[in-house]
Image (cartoon, rainbow, N blue to C red):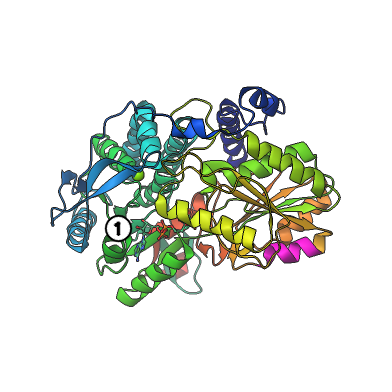
Amino acid sequence: MAMASSLRFSRLLSRSLSSASSSFFSPGGSAILGARVSKYSTDAAIEEPIKPSVQVEHTQLLINGKFVDAASGKTFPTLDPRTGEVIAHVAEGHSEDIDRAVAAARKAFDQGPWPKMTAYERQRILLRAADLIEKHNDEIAALETWDNGKPYEQSAQIEIPMLVRLVRYYAGWADKIHGLTVPADGPYHVQTLHEPIGVAGQIIPWNFPLVMFAWKVGPALACGNTIVLKTAEQTPLSALYVARLFHEAGLPPGVLNIVSGFGPTAGAALASHMDVDKLAFTGSTETGKVVLQLATKSNLKPVTLELGGKSPFIVCEDADVDQAVELAHFALFFNQGQCCCAGSRTFVHESIHEEFVAKAKARALKRVVGDPFKSGIEQGPQIDSDQFEKILKYIRSGVESGATLETGGDRLGNKGFYVQPTVFSNVQDGMLIAKEEIFGPVQSIFKFKDLGEVIQRANNTQYGLAAGVFTKNLDTANTLTRALRVGTVWVNCFDTFDAAIPFGGYKMSGQGREKGEYSLKNYLQVKAVVTPLKNPAWL
Ligand code: NAI
Ligand code: MG
């Protein structure tokens, strides 16, 4: 089942990538690409931005099934990363809005119909929501691309279909959650009830706004919890649209509340709220530590954390170099390099290192960067000026510390947040670019001699989110998959995400697992029910 779905996702990805002229799944692709665009050009990025074919409908907070202004009346602008210009002003939630949203979620849990509904009824609402999202795929994709800057073809063909798949997957779980009968040592009937935890607080980032929304909302709703979700301040629009569709599908008021706003205000208020029973967070390791402390200091609510990474992508000596180059390129550059699991340390065996570096550089030069609404675009702008500046700072640090800048290294165009696809070779483990999360289109290539050495170096990081292994040798693959201290190892593939496959980090990349059956545990608590057996002699 997991395999079939992941294959489906790979095919989806492959379709999308080939439409974006990537060649990993079709080896002829880069030749086609080469004929069309031989080098990224500033023209592509600075032309007049294409007008999105969607209107912004919702900018208020969604509390108790209604769109409302923030209590303070405040708003903040959400920006178009292509230009830095304002798309819309969005209601800015603060602690009083979090209080209102939590009160609505509390009521919907304690008195409302959601946890009391039959599991089958909950399932039907979630399935209807998935159908509605699917029906509005293209509008939602346009909104996402406008707010986030990711290529429209990827929003429409990967992200929204993944959201639909996740909602359907968790709808499927709704009526398959049950406890056990336990054989205790004594005359007792013992059973466990698997009950929803209550009000879930959820804080999500901007890099995959709707997939992160689904990882959080899907399991929480399937298990019968109610929710207050805070979107990232950079990308507030799409979750408001999609949450409205959940209500159209029959979700009762107060079950799913969306508060737009900033981390230190709305986010912190949610993490430290006494009436929130569980917290789930995705974002930086630094902020993860903050929310964990807030959760602990307030009411000891359990916390799930999906944090940063510095994932190795290991290319072994037996690899087909062209394929390895393409996959390593995808592993790093996908989503403008803004992936927690990006393959940001490309380790290449010394015997193929020189050829690999030359081809990785050539591939980066062919990357099609430009207006994400244009067909065939592989890379849009970075999310905002903070990330843009941070990436350029890391590039300068790479150069200063002596890595070889093979290509790129600067902004692209003169407006918006476009960054040239950048490749460094000769990167040493101690450099800042080798240790810290860059979160941008910057590939770092390292040379290695043998397996023992690369295992030690790959694991020599505070992070442990994911790893890629590229080899035809089964023994090598088996050794690496077991030795790498990470939550996901992709062998001869990368970023193969499916709703059924668990995801999460070892070490400082997180706590707990999301997606798959594992995620249900985050939103359930177990009650043991013990009843004496009155006539044990007859049983
Ligand atoms: P962040 O971790 O600060 O933000 C993620 C979410 O946390 C947002 O919704 C934000 O509003 C919220 N938040 C921020 N401070 C908070 C606080 N004190 N209390 C509660 N919530 C808070 O990440 P940011 O600033 O957007 O990006 C910084 C770096 O984090 C990136 O350069 C990247 O390295 C990493 N990052 C990792 C992501 C991942 O998927 N693991 C996603 C986004 C960023
Ligand atoms: Mg935006």
Asked if ligand 1 lies within 8 A of label 1, the reply is yes
Please give left or right for residue 72 compared with residue 139 in the image. Answer: left
Please name whichever residue, 356 or 109, is drawn nearer the observer in this view of the structure. Answer: 356
Under tag 1, what secondary structure?
A: loop
Residue 145 % position (x, y): 40, 36
**Start-end of magenta stretch:** 453-460
Q: What is the quadrant of residue 322 in the picture?
A: top right
Position of 302 relative to 255 (above/below):
below
Determine the residue positioned at 58% across, 64% down.
Answer: 463
Please name whichever residue, 78 or 83, is drawn nearer the observer in this view of the structure. Answer: 83
Residue 87 % position (x, y): 28, 39
Is 120 covered by the magenta stretch?
no
Secondary structure predominantly adopted by residues drawn in magenta: helix
Position of 92 relative to 293 (above/below):
above
Outermost residue, front side: 414
Position of 305 relative to 151 (above/below):
below
Please give left or right for residue 62 compared with residue 170 in the image. Answer: left
Is 455 covered by the magenta stretch?
yes
Disc count in the image? 1
Quarter of the image with the N terminus is top right
- Where is mark 1, residue-wise? 262
Residue 166 % position (x, y): 45, 41
Q: Does any portion of residue 309 appear in the rendered image? A: no
Determine the residue positioned at 48% across, 65% down.
Answer: 285
Please give left or right for residue 431 compared with residue 288 in the image. Answer: right
